Amino acid sequence: MPSNFNRAIAVFGAYGHTGRFVVERLRMRGWRPRLCGRDAARLQAMAGHTHADDVRVASIADAASLDAALAGCAALLNCAGPFGETCEPLIAAALRAGIHYLDTAAEQQPVLAAFERCDAAANEAGIAVVPAMAFYGGLGDLLATAAMDDWAQADSVEIAVALDRWHPTAGTRITGARNTAKRLVIEDGRLVEVADPAASRDWAFPEPFGTQAVAAVPMSEIALVSRHLRTRTATAYLDRGSLRDVRDADTPAPVAADASGRSAQVFAIEARVRRGGDARRLGACGRDIYAVTAPLLVEAMERVLDGRCRGSGVLAAGAAFDAADFLQALAPESLRLYPGEA
């Protein structure tokens, strides 16, 4: 990008667990993060810790405060859940400001609502809105898109996640408590509610996970897949140990294991696509599902701003970007791809 390119980026929810990783990633990449959020005390505390001098208090209930917070920025990164509450007002604010919007929503409903309610206005404004650009959501969609490669359609898309542990953040717990919508999968080419009880099966992950019992726990990756990949069925799974962790009120929050703030938790995420008798798979391993969201989100933002985004409107990650190239850009620093290059 040219040296005079606008490098001010608004991060809403900057003081949250994931938001802190995003702010640090922006600074590492030469951007100027503007710390935005609803809690003035937490913003000031973070500003003191990071030596930031661009801080704006704003509330989703106050459009004028949002407009002031976004003035002069090139993009808005929304890291503040529950996204069922923050997405719509923040997308509207980004459209008023004439800037691009990306978020880290894991919930399906706000992502689907963005496609249904905001696509026309974003297209008309020439703005890219990229929801769910995170570990849960965009990463699975990118892996599935890259695995499909030259296939125009598939019989099935499956995405599975294994974590050695899931120590949820306070934001994850709040979102989970408020997200009472039925989870959706794709059957016969359309979104339907996941079966109750959820389907369960064994999934062979690479080491150190090996074969794990997984249950259908579809998140925003299925909402993204439904918008641009032609497949008869699609679902997403989570290993049962992690599911127990996140449902247990006594499971602790993540603890930093190094100076970067990342926890020691490791993950594997894999997409498998089938067409007739043919099958393809592509996976990625890494460390800390919250921390890895930062390079995913910032890479997407950079591609939107430098013209490597396919069009405007509300876009799924796999539709917005060259999926294989995007994943390779994150390897090996943030992800280790397997079983080979995408």
Image: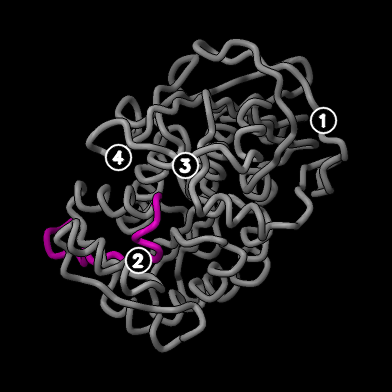
Give the extent of the magenta segment: 1-18
Q: Is residue 13 magenta-colored? A: yes
The local crowd at label 3, few if under 14, some if 14 to 19, many if 20 or more residues have their Cα within 10 Å, is: some
Q: Amino acid at mark 4?
A: Gly
Relative to residue 247, is residue 309 drawn left or right? left
- Front-lying residue, 40 or 150: 40
Distance in Å between CA atoms under marks 3 and 1: 28 Å
Q: Which residue is mark 1?
A: 199
Judge depth for marks 4 and 3 and give the one in front.
3
Question: Which residue appears at 62% of the width and 19% of the height?
Answer: 280
Outermost residue, left side: 3
Q: Which residue is mark 2?
A: 75
The mark total stands at 4
Residue 150 visible from this viewpoint:
no
Q: Which mark is residue 261?
A: 4
What secondary structure is the magenta-colored segment mainly?
loop
Q: Which residue is mark 3?
A: 253
Q: Amino acid at mark 2?
A: Ala
